[in-house]
Amino acid sequence: MNNALNEYFNAKIKELSERVNNALNEYFNAKIEEARRISVNHYEYYSKLKDFVLRGGKRLRPVSLIMAYKGIKGVIDEGVVRASLCVELLHNSSLIHDDIMDRDEYRRGEPTFHALYREWYRRVKAELNEHFGVSMGILGGDSLFNMGFEILSNAPFHPSLVIRSLNHYVEAYRELVDGMILDMMLPLLPSASEEDYMLMVSLKTGALFEKSIAIGATLAGGSELQVSKLSEYAQLAAQAFQVRDDVLGLFGGEEVGKPIGSDLREGKRTLIVIKALEGATQDDRIKLQRLLGKRDLTIQEVEEAKRIIISTGALNYAQAKALKLVEAAKQKLKEAKPPLNKEAEAFFTELTDFFIERSY
């Protein structure tokens, strides 16, 4: 990254993420007050949802929605900041459900939503506390999806733009679910391919980022070509993000926010695992296959998996793949007609670089 652009990018992310967080805080406070009138349990439920959403996260989806809007409209108004909350709530909805499916205990360094309720119920009644936690997690994810839909439905824009944006929103959720289905099914395939993985990523990760930018461009009244090319940019950039994320999940540090090797413990067929299985010796392939899905994986076994992945060239392959995706994304950004303003174009160019250079 160019130093001046890097400083601008970081400052813009900080500025807009703070505006998003302030809007989230205001929205949840109103929801919590409404819930208080129903029962103390509802009050605690919405308070826990607020804590989960606001405990961290980069806010890249709402920030990108806002910048796509500014790139076409030239301004950032409170209406688009409020509307941008829809994609952050949908993202967190998917995280709550994903944590249940992956049996993860921690998210952003704190207990996952279903784990919070499991432990809460354990104090009340020890029996069936696991079932209770999962049940509340399902409801929590459903609530956040509904809240996002509500926010976008009431966005202060022309009804035709809101309807088109809502179509993007529901498409994002449908594709995200399709991607989560594939993510669950890939470990069951005799040999998952790179194509299988990239399809899963395009749906599970790419769809929401793509539709976030499409919503911003749509609310700004962008042309069909602008929305189309920005969507293509976002899809490619998101795929690069996920490839890098899978690498960090095994080779990153504590700042990643979840235990190193959790994808291995779940038996996930990430790109680095797929390429390692393809290129490993017979002995190493058998070793790696035995480690995949082992819930009580030791630190030494994680290191053994890392050795195999490095020795096969799978790590280098994934890093090169992410770089190619980023370059393709930048090309799509240039093809948007009319072009975005210079500030937004610089922002999205830097964003793609951040996706593959980040350490968290």
Image: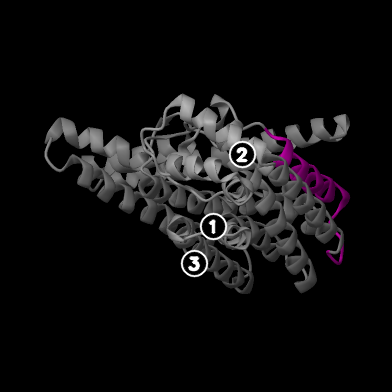
Q: Could you say whether the residue bearing mark 3 is in a helix, strand or loop?
A: helix
Q: Which residues are magenta?
A: 336-358
Query: Disc 1 residue type?
Result: Lys
Q: Quadrant of residue 252?
A: top right
Q: On the rendered structure, is 318 left or right of 324?
A: left
Residue 19 seen by the camera: no
Q: Are the two marked residues, 3 and 2, in contact with CB atoms closer than 8 angstroms?
A: no
The tag on residue 309 is 2
Instruction: List the residue tagged with mark 1.
Output: 204
The tag on residue 236 is none
Q: Could you say whether the residue bearing mark 1 is in a helix, strand or loop?
A: helix
In front: mark 1 or mark 3? 1
Q: Is residue 109 above or below residue 317?
A: above
Q: Nearer the viewer, residue 283 or 276?
A: 283
Query: Disc 2 residue type?
Result: Ile
Q: Are the two marked residues, 1 and 3, in contact with CB atoms closer than 8 angstroms?
A: no
| Spot occupied by residue 126 in the image (x, y as percentages of width and height) | 13, 35
Q: Are the two marked residues, 2 and 1, in contact with CB atoms closer than 8 angstroms?
A: no
The quarter of the picture where the N terminus appears is top right
The quarter of the picture where the C terminus appears is top right
Query: Disc 3 residue type?
Result: Arg
Closer to the chain start, of discs 2 and 1, is: 1
The tag on residue 174 is 3
How many labels sit on residues?
A: 3
Query: Is the residue marked by circle 3 packed among few (<14), some (14-19), or many (20+) residues within 10 Å?
Result: some
- Give the CA separation, mark 1 to mark 3: 10 Å
Give me the residue at 68% from left, 66% from top: 218
Q: Could you say whether the residue bearing mark 2 is in a helix, strand or loop?
A: helix
Q: Nearer the viewer, residue 287 or 155?
A: 287
